[in-house]
Amino acid sequence: MAYYSYHSTSFLTDESAMTPAIEFPISATGLLGRALTLYRRHFWDFVGLLAVPLFVAVVAMTALVLFPVGIPQPAQDFDVRALWRLFSWPRRLLLVLAFLAFPFSLALAQAATVFGVAGALLGDKPNIGRSYAKIRPAIARLAALSVLLSVGVNIGIGFFIVPGLLLLLASALSVPALTLEGIGPIAAIARSIKLLKGQAAAVLLGVFITLPLTILIGFLANWPLIFLQSRLSAPGEFLFSLLAASRALSFFWVGPALVLPWLFVVFTLAYLRSRVQLEGFDASSLVTSGA
């Protein structure tokens, strides 16, 4: 297998100390394999970077939707518009903010993963606390980027789906660019489009592997709750809402928390490899400038 390689300096240690060569596979499948190796080697660290903020966002979103209003029974009678009309305007505003917290939690975790991957490439163990500390200066810009992409993707999906998916793929490298280059959200999307040259195959493969796997794990996590709900003859409104909330939590948290960290590693490696290919940078200088 062919590799791009270079020597770099660790941002976690003395900057004058040289580390072993870091190698980036040239092929898309090689990059995915390299991401899988890092993900397996540091599984709990990468999962931990996403699991906590995503859990908070999903719990907030689920609680605001289901409590204390509850949802109508049976489940097939669920009507989003009818449920929306039950909410007061302050509750509607909180609900919108809760839904925006979901993509924001993903952006935060992806940004922290950038530093976790850099540490892993340099032979260090990713540190959750240190990774999140390093993204603190970028939090406001990450929030703006997550809102911009959420609105754009949802509008695009509303217009025959394809435009929204194209925006999502085009912005795959925007979080690493924003985090490490200190640029704004619009500039980060533009940088992502530019840096996708030569990386699109790896990004597309990563997304096409991740989406069905995430959904499958979500359904598997739901099966025990579906079985439990089927065994209850006439659950009260609170119990029914509690089961519905648990199912939503298992679907929107378990799958993404286990699979998306690998995709974030793929995006980070694709970003770093692109800058090595197109601009001659190394991972150390990128991480140091972003920190």
Image: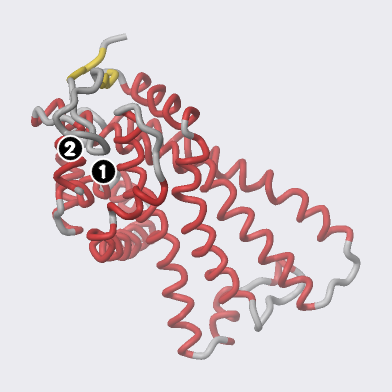
Rendering quarter of residue 160: bottom left
Does 137 sit above or below residue 30?
below
For mark 1, what is the residue? 173
Query: Residue 148, image x and y in percent?
Result: 27, 63
Q: Are marks 2 and 1 in contact (CB under 8 Å)?
A: yes
What residue is at 25 percent from the left and 14 percent from the top?
3
Q: Quadrant of the N terminus?
A: top left
What residue is at 82 percent from the left and 53 percent from the top?
227
Question: Left of 57 or right of it: where is 240?
Answer: right
Badge count = 2
Crowding at mark 2 (Cα within 10 Å: few <14, some 14-19, many 20+): many
Alpha-carbon span between mark 2 and mark 1: 7 Å
- Give the secondary structure at mark 2: helix
Amino acid type, callout 2: Leu
Mark 2 or mark 1: name the one nearer the start of the chain. Answer: 1
Query: Residue 47, image x and y in percent?
Result: 50, 43
- Give the secondary structure at mark 1: loop
For mark 2, what is the residue? 195
Q: Nearer the viewer, residue 242 or 88?
A: 242
Does 205 sit above or below residue 165?
above
Q: Residue furthest left?
A: 279
Q: Is residue 179 visible?
A: yes
